[in-house]
Each structure stands twice: as structure tokens, then as C-alpha cells.
Image: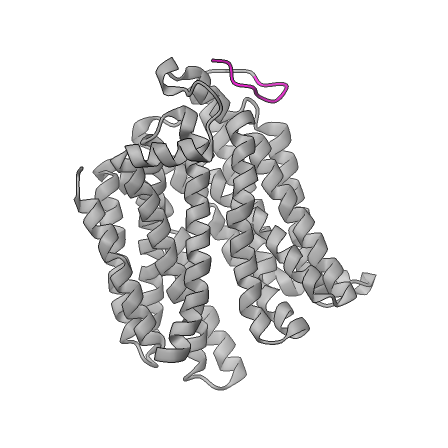
Amino acid sequence: MRTRGWPGDRHPPAAALQRRTLGLLVSTQVIGGLGVASGVSIGALLAAEMAGPTAAGLSGSAAVIGAALIAIPATRLMRTGGRRPGLVFAYAAGVTGSLLVVTAVWLQWVPLLFLGTFLFGGASAANLQSRYAAVDLADRDRRARHLSLVVWATTLGAVVGPNLAPFTDRVTMPWGAPEYAGPYLFSALAFGLGAVALFVLLRPDPLLTARSLADVSDLPEKSSSWRSAFAAIRASVGARLGVSAVAVGHVVMVGVMSMTPVHIGGYVHEHGDLLRIVGLVISVHITGMYALSPVIGWATDRFGRRPVILSGVVLLALACALSATAGDRTVQLSVALGLLGVGWGGTMVAGSTLLSESVPVGERAGVQGLSDVIMGVSAATAGALAGVVVDLFGYATLSVLAGIAVVPLAALALRRS
């Protein structure tokens, strides 16, 4: 079977191509992560200023849903043309969304703001899908480490990006740009650079090369579809566990993390102190999510996919127990959010690796895209419901429910057939 690619594809030795691909993915992940963090850091504030406090939560949900739904056409492009067209498309959606947000700020037009935020999520979809491109040509005993390096590269963007927001506003406002436009202009530039780098340098395409090196029996007779992706997941115990680990870990993390600033606001009432404490706790959480990814990847290759998924489940449950009992103890809450991030990393890295190697290479792009759609929609739903739970029953109840949510994942990970 011949797989149609983009012009210019060649097939050098797989090991050399994998090294080059990994270096490119890490570089573009840093650039894309800076762009995402720059916009996300002020997205809620911008929405609240333009449309009121209720719109702040809706803005975040729009970006998460955008990331999930834009993954659908991006995955379709990957199924037929390889990683490059899909990743470029997703970053291009992010560029478009960033510029629409800037236009919405200029015109003070709220519907355009939400449309732009939705498309802005495309860059997050590109960052998430990049982790799978790191696995296409990796040796089995290095797959998790290579995937984890791409996840780890997000750390720089997550830490530095929010701090660039004030700087970009100061640079752009003297040129006539309105307040809050600067971070999104920077995001558009970052996503554009990422798209150009992938379009020019991701050659040969790693997914197309992996297909060309695969056994004929691993390739479908025709281009895979969402139906065949569902079938591939149902047919594999490992794929079902991988999808579940990624989705459940993300649901628990988003549900608890999204409402933590609200909980802190319940016992810290001075504005300056509130921002400082929220920033500290969320920084600990982000560090837990990304900084230890290489260690998690090494452990996944060394000890196996299931043990690391189970370890992630234990950490998520422990984090939920600590957050449920933290009350106004900020140190305990910080520890809880740090463990929540590390537990998420275990389910994300080990789950993504297990999913990728549990399906035929011809179905890989479709299955991975479907997994990210499930993850994104589930997390957006969890984020929306989390606010309702906290409003009605409190943050402790939310944490307890999140802890209960990991029990079925633990049962699935312990089951071998």
C-alpha cells in the first residue's frame, strides 16, 4: 500500500530521522507553549472585562473545546498526509484565533472574542498531538522517554509565557494596540513560527515513514476512519487502558485545578495576596505536570506502562485527599496540587505511550486523535461541572468526587484481559 504524503518526502535511516524529528518537536513545543501560555494567562481577565465575570469561565471552556474539536480535522489530515499537514493546520487555527481575539478587543465585540478563543485552542491541539509524533519512529524501549521529552518541553512555555504578557502589552500599546492585545499578537507570532518550522523541516514525515517501514498486515486496506479508530480501541485491552488513563487523568486534573483559585479566594480576601498565593500554588502544580516528565518517561520504559499508570492513579487519589482536607492551609494545598500534576503526568505519558503501541500503525493517527477528542470534551465537561459542584457543595466535595473518579481506572489497570 502506498500512502500519499506531501511533496519532498524521503526516507533516510529511521534512527537518524527520529533524532532530528525529536529535536524539531521539542523546539516547536517550546515556541508553541510560549504562545499558548501567553494568551491563556490573560484570557479570563480579558473575557471578564469585556463581558463580565461569568464569561471568564466560558472563555476557558471555549479554548478547551476548541482544542478537542480542531483535533478532528487535524487528525483527518494526518491519516491521509502524515503528521506535518495536521500539525500545521492546528497551529494555523491558533494564529487565526489569536488575530480574531485582537480584533475583538479592538472592536469590543464579545461574540468574536469567543470565536477567536475557540480557534486559539487549535494551538493546544497541535502541542498535544506533537507528543504522538515523537513515538512514530522511536524504539520500543525509548518510546515513553521520547514522548515525555516533548511533554517536558512545555515547561518553559508554561513558566515563561505568563510573565511575557505584561511585556508584550508594553511593547504593542505605543503602536496603537489596545490593552490585552499584546499577548495575543505574540501568540500569533509564536504559532506562525511553529507552523513554518514544521512545514519546512518535518521532512520526511515520521508517520509516513513509520507506515512505509511497517508490515503490510499492519496497514489498513483504505484510509482509516473514526469508525475504524473506535474498532481498533475496542479490539485492544492496551488501547482501552491508554485512552482511559489519558482521559481520566485529565478530567481529575482539570476539575480540581480549575476551581483551586476560587477556593483560595474564599479564605484570602486581599487582592494582592490572592494573586500571589494563586500564582504560587498554580506554579507548583504546573511544575508537577511537566518538569518531571523525563523521569516519568524513563520509569515507563523501565518498569512498564501499567505500573506507571497505577502510580499516577495513586498520586491523583492522594492529591484529591489532601486538597479535600486542606481548608485554608496553603502549604498542604500546594503539595496537593503538585501531586495532582505529577499524577496527571503519569497517566498522560504512560497512557499515551501504551495507546500508541497498542494499535496498528495504519490506525495510529486516527486512534490518537480520537483519544484527544475524548480527553478534551471530557475535561471541558468536568471543568463546567466543577463550578456547579463547588457552588452547591464546596471545594472539599469536588475533591472527594474527583478522587472517586480514579477508582474505575485503577480497576482497569489491574485487569489484564
**Side of 175 where 216 appears, left or right:** left
State the residue lying farthest toward the bottom.
269
Report the quarter where the C terminus lies.
top left
> Looking at the image, which residue is at 38% across and 36% down?
230
Total marks shown come to 0
Q: In this view, does 264 lie above or below 228?
A: below
Q: Is residue 172 visible?
A: yes
Q: In this view, does 70 lie above or below 17?
A: below
> Looking at the image, which residue is at 61% across and 22% down?
6
**Side of 247 where 61 appears, left or right:** right
Provide residue 413's location: percent of width, then percent of height: 21, 45
**Side of 171 where 22 appears, left or right:** left
Provide residue 95's location: percent of width, then percent of height: 67, 47
Q: Is residue 311 above or below residue 338?
A: above
Provide residue 414's location: percent of width, then percent of height: 17, 46
Q: In which quarter of the image is residue 149?
A: top left
Q: Which colour scheme is used?
A: one colour
Q: What stretch is highlighted in magenta?
A: 1-9
Provide residue 222's location: percent of width, then percent of height: 47, 20
Our reading of the magenta stretch's main secondary structure is loop
Q: Quadrant of residue 267?
A: bottom left
Task: Judge by depth and name the residue closer to the eye, 378 or 263.
Answer: 378
Q: Is residue 301 visible?
A: no
> Looking at the image, which residue is at 44% across and 45% down?
372
> Looking at the image, which residue is at 42% across and 73% down?
388
Instruction: Check residue 38 for magenta coloring.
Output: no
Task: Judge by depth and name the residue closer to the eye, 300 or 252.
Answer: 252
**Side of 144 where 76 appears, left or right:** right
